Amino acid sequence: MTNTTLCYIEKDGKYLMLHRVKKINDLNKDKWIGIGGKLENCESPQDCIRREVKEESGLELGKIEYRGFVTFVDMSQEDNPYTEYMHLFWTDDFKGQLKVCDEGDLEWVLKSKMNDLPHWKGDEIFLDLIDKKAPFFSLKLVYKNGVLLESILN
């Protein structure tokens, strides 16, 4: 099981998104996702998201909001399912200049166009909750071969 973070950085009705096209053997290959990554030893989710955003985008985060927790389960290998615990953050408080990311291409995407891009289907659920400023939530998403089989909110 893996602990990760994702941040949805907002500016002018757009989210800064990462099109995952550069890494080999990437579970997120060709998908558009928020900025984030794996927690390192002794890191809190807040420490991790600040470090990952700086490393991947060059931006420094100001105030961040911890918006939700997602249990992501991939049942593609039934004898060895993959589980990831994702800590979701949102902010519109940042500074710095975007840099080239070694994991994919960074782009500001209109929130209204997010669902038009290749993404995990369950992302639509939590992005809607983030956009509506819903209270802190817990969401379980179960996939098999890239298809969303089950979603359980709270």
Image (spheres, rainbow, N blue to C red):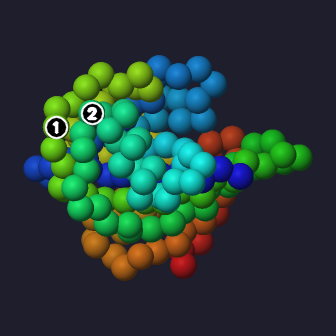
Seen in the picture, residue 29 relative to 132 is either above or below; the reply is above
- Within 10 Å of disc 2 (Cα), the crowding (few <14, some 14-19, many 20+) is some
Residue 117 at x, y percent in the picture: 37, 38
- What residue is rendered at 53% in x and 22% in y? 23
Left-right relation of 154 to 13? right
Residue that lies at the very extreme toward the right in this rendered image = 79
The residue singled out by tag 1 in the image is 96
Cα–Cα gap, marks 2 and 1: 7 Å
Q: Would you say the residues marked 2 and 1 are in contact, meaning their CB atoms lie under 8 Å apart?
A: yes
| Labels 2 and 1: the sequence-earlier one | 2
- With respect to residue 116, does 42 lie above or below? below
Residue visible at 41% across and 58% down in the picture: 46
Q: Is residue 122 shown left or right of residue 16? A: right
Q: Quadrant of residue 57?
A: top left
Q: Mark yes or no: residue 3 visible.
A: yes
Q: Is residue 63 above or below residue 54?
A: below
Question: What crowding class fits label 1: few (fewer than 14 Cα within 10 Å), some (14-19), or many (20 or more)?
Answer: few
Q: Can the viewer see residue 117?
A: no
The circle drawn on residue 58 is 2
Which quadrant of the structure image shows residue 19? Answer: top left
Query: What x and y, as percent, mark residue 101?
Result: 35, 25
Identified at 27% across, 33% down, the residue is 58
Decide if residue 150 is on the left or right side of residue 50.
Answer: right
Say what secondary structure mark 1 lies in.
loop
- Image position of 67 (left or right of 74): left
Which of the two residues, 74 or 11, is positioned nearer the viewer here? 11
Q: Position of residue 142 (x, y in %)?
A: 66, 57
Residue at 54 percent of width and 78 percent of height:
154
Q: Amino acid at mark 2?
A: Gly
In what element is the residue under mark 2? Answer: loop
